[in-house]
Image (cartoon, rainbow, N blue to C red):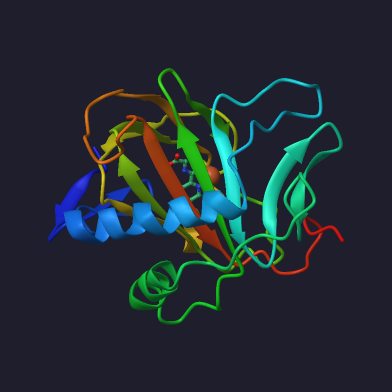
Amino acid sequence: MSLFETSGRIDIRGVELLRDALDRSAQEALVDDLRRVAGVAPFYHPETRRGQKFSVRMTSAGAVGWISDRKGYRYQPHHPSGGGWPSIPPQLRELWCAILPEAATPDTCLVNYYGEGARMGMHQDKDEADLSQPVLSVSLGDEALFRVGNIERGGRTESVWLRSGDVAVIGGAARLVHHGIDRIRFGSSDLLPQGGRINVTMRVAGSGPGAAA
Ligand code: MD6
Ligand code: FE
């Protein structure tokens, strides 16, 4: 078993999990920030190129946002409705700098909302221009079963329940590992009034092949 714990840091196949990185008041402040983000850039239901709806709803903050539609997936500088993305909440920027002092400045923040029954299939985060830059994720609300695999598809995997306030960093040798959310425990947290889970991922998207004008 490759799972070990050292003072709140858990290594899951190279993904670094910082348990309880945010206390309850920080989580509540972040939910308020994200409510403002969603006020400007509403959550929408993305679909795949084949027209399949994701079960999660998404929005973004930052110079660019990650979107998926019938044209495929990419970073783009505007919401699907045409408006710009709001700026990344300062609290999130500060969290990034505190945890990743060596990293470049994040230019995007993807916000995923998981309602009852939502999940996310195994995937790699590889649309960013510079894959030496890490991705930092924050979990808020209901617990979620996070599965981490390998850089190649398939093979053995390891799973862990992410809880509200946990932060995960995918970087370094693990930057391209496959990962996903098998399910959430709907109603396991009272952070979000309507239940469900929010996952925020901050990245340095840059202007690589994933970026579109
Ligand atoms: C989620 N997380 O926690 C999905 N990606 O809902 C991700 O897809 C993820 O946690 C890149 C880095 C960290 C992550
Ligand atoms: Fe991901």
> Residue at 23% of width from left, 43% of height from top?
3
- The location of residue 39, given as percent across then percent down, is 55, 51
Horizontal side of residue 166 vs 114, given as left or right = left
Q: Is residue 13 left or right of residue 163?
A: right
Horizontal and vertical percent position of residue 151: 56, 44
Camera sees residue 158: yes
When the figure is inspected, residue 60 is found, relative to residue 112, above or below; the finding is: below
In front: 109, or 137? 109
Tell me residue 2's x, y (percent): 27, 43
- Nearer to the camera, 68 or 206: 68
Looking at this rendering, what residue extends furthest in the left direction? 7
Q: Nearer the viewer, residue 108 or 175?
A: 108
Asked if residue 106 is positioned above or below residue 74 in the image, the reply reads below
Q: Quadrant of residue 121?
A: top right
Q: Which of 201 and 24 lies nearest the eye of the viewer?
A: 24
Quarter holding the N terminus is: top left
Residue 72 in which image quadrant: top right
